[in-house]
Amino acid sequence: MDASVRTPHSEVDDPISAEIIIHAVSAIPNLIDKNITRTAFSPLVSEYKDYAVGIVDHEGRLISQCRGSIPIFVANALSAAVRDGLKVYGPDRLQHGDIVITNHAATMGQHLNNVVMYTPIRTGEGELFGFFAIVMHWVDVGGIVVGSCLSNSTTDVFQEGIQFHTVKLYARGEPVEEIHRMIVANTRFPQMVLGDLASQVAGCLMGRSMIAEVLEKHGLSRVQAAVNRFWDHSEAVVRSTIREIPNGTYTASSFLDDDGVHKDATIPAVVSVHVEDEEITIDLSELGAEVQGPLNAGYEGGAVAAARIACKYFFSSEDPANDGAFRPIKVHCPPGRFLSAGPTAPLSGSGSMLPTVVDTILRALGKALPDRVPAGHHGTYGIHVLFGKLANGGGWFQHLESSIGGWGAARNGDGPGPFRSIVHGDTMEVPVEMQEASYPYRVDWVRLRADSGGPGQYRGGLGVEKCYALLGPAEITTIFERTKCPPWGIEGGQPGKTGYVEVHYADGRESETLLKGEAVLAEGDRVLLYSAGGGGFGDPRLRSKERILEDVRLGYVSGEAAATEYGFRQH
């Protein structure tokens, strides 16, 4: 059968049969998701959930993906990897039992820790249905810093780790020993990486087998027809929502602090949204140019990901991610922008720009339908990494965490949070008990940050304060953004407070503030993290007395801020 020809919908007897098939296919990535949580070694995967599971068809089009997926992966990471594999090998050289991996910068456009693994799904007759794929953040793939993706100052991708450009980890069920040896030789954490890799392999194989059962039960043509029906329905839903927007061009702008190398140079983020009938084009041609430091991403992992994430939130936030929902969305971003950087550009911070760009796209869409877009959210990964050598020859340790902060208020309520950034989704907090049992520090407190939410008739969501007390030597790297372009308010609402990190030294040295920076720590030092709040909505003077009193009572707003920001004084 010609792979380019769609199976006619008449192959499915009725819509109920199609729903049964697509629900069966959609449930499988969620089951594999749970297995990865139980079997992965690193807390970044098992607790934080920095991975995604999905199925793509024989052309690399997304069929379904697990609900817990990080939005940056939902956009197109699995599809980009598989499409490259089809170019490199062709469908005939991807056989049952093969497992392929890639983190190739020119293909994926993301930091090299994000490794996609996939395996072909073939029927008993050998026909190719598609691929079961899992992308996972490997905790270290070499490079000049512990953790690979955590540098503020790399200037090309070769400083950031090893690249696997679409290579077979298994060939017809047999391990390719040379690739396994290369993986072990290029990580500081071989036990964790191999443990996560084993979980990833098991997930691919189990998912492949479960999809094969669906194909055996219903037949290839009926499953393909159900998938086409599913795609067409999702496409129609998005097109109908786009029709609600008046034709025209909507623009918005913001900016990033710096690229980590040139600390005094902001990076413009100007976006235009062109709406024409049932289609929308996200135009990113006016973004800042590719930068010298590691705040770049390639086209697929940058421009396409940012545009699709924003449109997913705006047009189909409740529906499962799939190829059909993205058909009406076009992306324009010429080569050489910081979200369409060249193949050798440094991109260890490839995700750190996306929250701001996604926020800005939504800001532009808000000019068309203002009721549907809230104020700006905290808008940064807020990465902070504590790492070093364990005592008594225990080897390296690394704790990577992203910040939770406030999201923007809307015209019908206060901003939610604290949550992670808009491109993180449902990534979880690593339990404090696990952190303290594994790393040489104590967490003295985690609490809401008073007055961090932007004042307004509806207040922005709050950031947090967190204190790490060092019990031994370590180093810290921080990557905080949106400190010069705070989370904006709307309709008279005020911006949220920005985030930062303070290091307090036990030896009496003056404390140090870090944004994109590094510090060497000793026992007794403390690290205080302050995350940003979301922007407010509406004139703060219109906030009700009851809400202000409740905010003060709960410690969300100080008495001083109630007076100065809201004009409210208790008598």
Image (cartoon, helix red, strand yellow):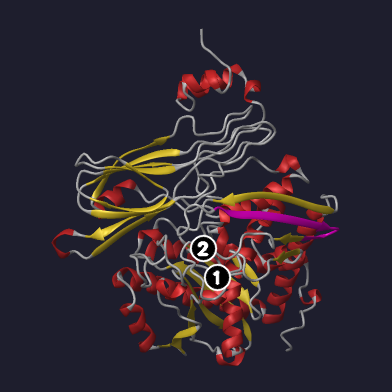
Q: Does label 1 or label 2 sit earlier along the sequence?
A: 1
- Residue 26 visible in the shown view: no
Residue 185 relative to residue 31: left or right: left
Secondary structure state at the residue bearing disc 2: loop
The numbered mark at residue 77 is: none
Q: How many marks?
A: 2
Residue 447 relative to residue 472: left or right: right
The crowd level at tag 1 (other Cα within 10 Å; few <14, some 14-19, many 20+) is many
Q: CA distance from mark 1 to mark 2?
A: 8 Å
Q: Which corner quadrant of the image does residue 27 belong to?
A: bottom right
- Residue 79 visible in the shown view: yes
Q: Residue at x 53, y 47 (%)?
A: 482
Residue situated furthest bottom in the rendering: 92
Task: Establish if 39 lies above or below 451.
Answer: below
The reply to whether discs 1 and 2 touch (Cβ–Cβ < 8 Å) is yes
Task: Report the magenta residues as a range.
Answer: 266-280
Percent position (x, y) of residue 211? 57, 75
Write down the residue under mark 2. 350
The numbered mark at residue 109 is: 1
